[in-house]
Amino acid sequence: MEPEMEDKTLELMCSLPRSLWLGCSSVAESLCALRCLQSLPTSRAHNQNLTVMESQNLTDDLSPKKTTVFKLSNGSLSRKRPSRVSFEKEKEMCIQMFEQWSEADQVEFVEHLISRMCHYQHGHINSYLKPMLQRDFITALPAQGLDHIAENILSFLDARSLCSAELVCREWQRVISEGMLWKKLIERMVRTDPLWKGLSERHQWEKYLFKNRTNEVPPNSYYHSLYPKIIQDIETIEANWRCGRHNLQRIQCRSENSKGVYCLQYDDDKIISGLRDNSIKIWDKHSLECLKILTGHTGSVLCLQYDDRVIVTGSSDSTVRVWDASSGEVLNTLIHHNEAVLHLRFCNGLMVTCSKDRSIAVWDMASATDISLRRVLVGHRAAVNVVDFDDKYIVSASGDRTIKVWSTSTCEFVRTLNGHKRGIACLQYRDRLVVSGSSDNTIRLWDIECGACLRVLEGHEELVRCIRFDNKRIVSGAYDGKIKVWDLQAALDPRAPASTLCLRTLVEHSGRVFRLQFDEFQIISSSHDDTILIWDFLNVSANGQSEGRSPSRTYTYISR
């Protein structure tokens, strides 16, 4: 067909009602029908009942066309299809011409043709093209020797998606199995989530992770079946926290002339505690036996922190002592504060101490024996009870009812957080969040950058003495002898009702709670009642109680 004729025909196609030509099964048929329509009178309004019995072909190249009948009635046109032989011949001619063109010309022609079609036809074309445009690259990559790329792509899936991928086809299942992708998923969770890491250590399946393919590594099916068991363990632990189900272990630290455990810190193997009787006791976390006693302070041990190399303690004798973590030998004694050292923190070569003398001391800690005073921060009007810091801020809280923020790098004052109605006894700071406890019996959550109080938690009946938080929970201990577990995420949501924030109250101590530390599986707390309690939310017996007092085993150590 000549270009002019083609354009004229397509133009006529677009000008006519769709009902006249939508029934055509191909472009060739549409053009054929339109040729016949060109022979009709131009005014269709005067020819509604006209029946066209025959129409001759308009061009010589389409001369074999059989007679086509059109019938106009009430504005609609019905058409008898041309013979199949004629259609196949015309289609073959079009295909032959199309195949002679370059790819660019073919694309241009098809684009032009599609632009002249209606939405109905576009839908049919889209349905036809859609499966042609899809590619099973996971199956195709191994065929090209690129199994590792297919495995790497699927390794980013979560558990639900990985289950679905296994059901796609046998090839996908083979890639997942041979690539040990369930093992890699569990390893990724262990690396990024402390709860998974803790479970891997406690349940002994960590030994099957982070190893190359050897005879010691189980097949992929082992990890596939392990994953839902881990999820079940996690759900059980979360339920134990919410319901207060736990096993309790108790260490009695009685001494002859004093009573009270003021501070503690623990790891997987040991608990180190500072006592009112001036001593530091180190306990085996599994047997709960006392391994070592460090003596040297002439006053109560009020605060401590340790790492792999040293134990640093602060005392009511106004000194800070540095001990060798292995031998228990005193390596250094820092004499600066004029009154009791109430709290201290050290990390990455920096140590901060605070005192009843209202000051904060910032120390450069090159080594256990090379510690020098960098700066003294003054601004509080009462004893500074607690400090915490990171690379950006030093945060301190005082009996003067205020929290002060200082620059870690310059030691310059930044801002004051006001809100508590009485002195502040404890706080923790991480990222932008500060959580503090006060003798006004409340806990407050603060945004350190703007100084805004985000939430006030009420529930304790006496001074809130110690507080810790992680990504999920806040755990607080008070002079009322109670430990409360709070929902941190709910507390940060202003829409959450206050009545939903406290998840559980734990009552086992018979005296004031002085210090606590917790992780995903347990809380360890110390009290004026001279005990250390281990609240285990992982290894809960079948008859573990959610209310009341828990079954416990008690160990008593009597100094000689």
Image: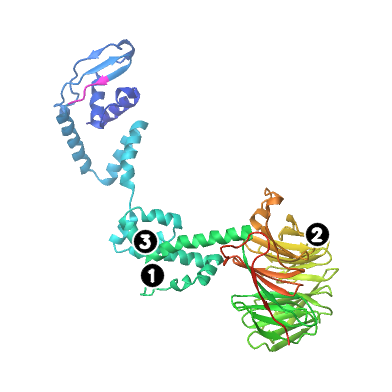
Q: Mark 3: few, some, or many residues within 10 Å (few <14, many ≥20)?
A: many
Mark 2 secondary-structure assignment: loop
Q: Mark 2: few, some, or many residues within 10 Å (few <14, many ≥20)?
A: many
Secondary structure predominantly adopted by residues drawn in magenta:
loop
Q: Which residue is mark 2?
A: 420
The residue under the point 58% across, 62% down is: 543
Mark 3 secondary-structure assignment: helix
Q: Position of residue 558 (x, y in %)?
A: 72, 83
Marker disc for residue 176: 3
Q: Earlier in the sequence, mark 1 or mark 2?
A: 1
Type of the residue with mark 2: His
Q: Position of residue 193 (x, y in %)?
A: 54, 65
The residue under the point 53% across, 68% down is: 197
Alpha-carbon span between mark 2 and mark 3:
56 Å
Is the residue 362 above or below the residue 41 in the image?
A: below
Q: The C terminus appears in which quarter of the rendering?
A: bottom right
Mark 1 secondary-structure assignment: loop
Q: Position of residue 415 (x, y in %)?
A: 77, 63
Q: Earlier in the sequence, mark 2 or mark 3?
A: 3
Q: Is 154 inside the magenta-drawn segment?
A: no
**Occupied quadrant, residue 550:** bottom right
Q: Earlier in the sequence, mark 3 or mark 1?
A: 3
Residue stretch rendered in magenta on the structure: 78-82
Q: Is residue 57 shown left or right of residue 319?
A: left
Marker disc for residue 218: 1
Q: Is residue 547 visible?
A: yes
Type of the residue with mark 1: Pro
